[in-house]
């Protein structure tokens, strides 16, 4: 992902060590890191974030202000949207429905086209455009707490589910099933990333309950 360095994990001194690159010497014991056992070899830790503009037919969320890796604190307000087949992010705010071609490069993503629904892709853009044209999404209808970006996105998702003859999702169910697990994974990754950025490396003891971060 643009603008971020990949996290690397390697094992030494019976600990997991995270950094942005494999150092020549262990930062704990200063021993040279030459050949290692396969189990201790460096591995890349995949980022939970993706460039939302490269995601088709997906639900995206990101901090309303700033980015996950920089400003997000676990209590930050989130902004959400839906991508079309070209990665344009449709989202609703006090200006009405926006169609963003930039600004969602560091997002958490929930793919919406499940197996068996791929036939929808050809009609997705028309559905999204027609839905967005409804008067419910005019600027003056926006209410920060009750008629907002989440209302817009979840109602579109439920319209798609109805088209497929599937059951509806309420906000709590959708949040707990799709948003919370991704947010928790992201929080662990953010903690690691910021610690490495600040100190150059981060160490977790293998016996620690933190020993299995992302």
Image (spheres, rainbow, N blue to C red):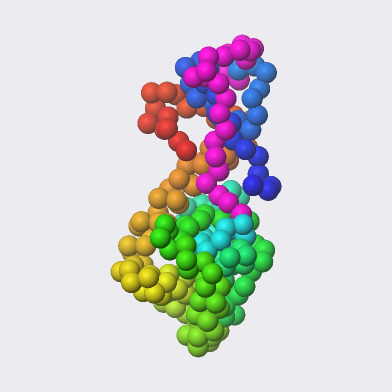
- At which x and y percent is residue 117? 43, 63
Q: Residue at x 57, y 33 (%)?
A: 44
Q: Residue at x 57, y 68 (%)?
A: 84
Q: Is residue 32 magenta?
A: yes
Q: Is 161 or 47 nearer to us in this picture?
A: 161
* Residue 155 as seen in the image, left or right of residue 76: left
In the shown orientation, is residue 113 left or right of residue 83?
left
Residue toward you, 57 or 93: 57
**Going 47% across and 62% down the picture, which residue do you hit?**
118
**Residue 10 drawn in magenta:** no
45 with respect to 200 (left or right): left
Q: Position of residue 166 (x, y in %)?
A: 33, 68
Q: Which stretch did the figure color magenta?
A: 27-51
Quarter of the view holding residue 4:
top right
Q: How many labels were placed on the picture?
A: 0
Task: Give the answer, above or below, for where 8 lies relative to 38.
Answer: below
Q: Residue at x 62, y 15 (%)?
A: 33
Residue 194 at x, y = what percent?
58, 40
147 relative to 9, above or below = below
- Residue farthest toward the left in the current orientation of the protein: 167
The one nearer the camera, 11 or 88, is 88
* Residue 211 in view of the camera: yes
Residue 199 on image: x %, y %: 61, 32
Residue 94 seen anywhere in this rendered image of the structure? no
In the displayed structure, 174 sits above or below 72; it is: below
Dominant secondary structure (helix, strand or loop) of the stretch shown in magenta = loop
Q: From this view, report whether residue 182 is shown above or below residue 159.
A: above
Which residue is nearer to you in this view: 69 or 114? 114
């Amino acid at each position: 992902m643009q603008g971020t360095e990949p996290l690397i994990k390697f094992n030494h001194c019976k600990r997991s060590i995270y950094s942005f690159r494999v150092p020549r010497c262990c930062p704990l014991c200063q021993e040279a890191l030459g050949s290692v056992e396969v189990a201790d070899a460096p591995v890349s830790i995949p980022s939970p974030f993706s460039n939302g503009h490269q995601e088709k037919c997906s639900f995206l969320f990101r901090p309303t202000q700033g980015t996950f890796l920089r400003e997000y604190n676990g209590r930050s307000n989130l902004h959400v949207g839906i991508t079309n087949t070209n990665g344009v992010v449709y989202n609703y705010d006090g200006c009405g429905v926006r169609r963003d071609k930039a600004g969602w490069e560091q997002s958490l993503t929930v793919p919406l086209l499940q197996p068996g629904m791929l036939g929808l892709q050809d009609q997705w853009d028309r559905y999204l455009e027609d839905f967005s044209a409804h008067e419910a999404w005019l600027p003056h209808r926006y209410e920060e707490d009750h008629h907002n970006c989440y209302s817009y996105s979840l109602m579109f998702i439920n319209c798609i589910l109805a088209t497929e003859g599937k059951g509806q999702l309420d906000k709590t169910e959708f949040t707990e099933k799709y948003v919370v697990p991704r947010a928790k994974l992201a929080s662990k990754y953010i903690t690691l990333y910021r610690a490495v950025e600040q100190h150059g490396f981060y160490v977790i003891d293998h016996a620690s309950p933190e020993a299995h971060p992302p």
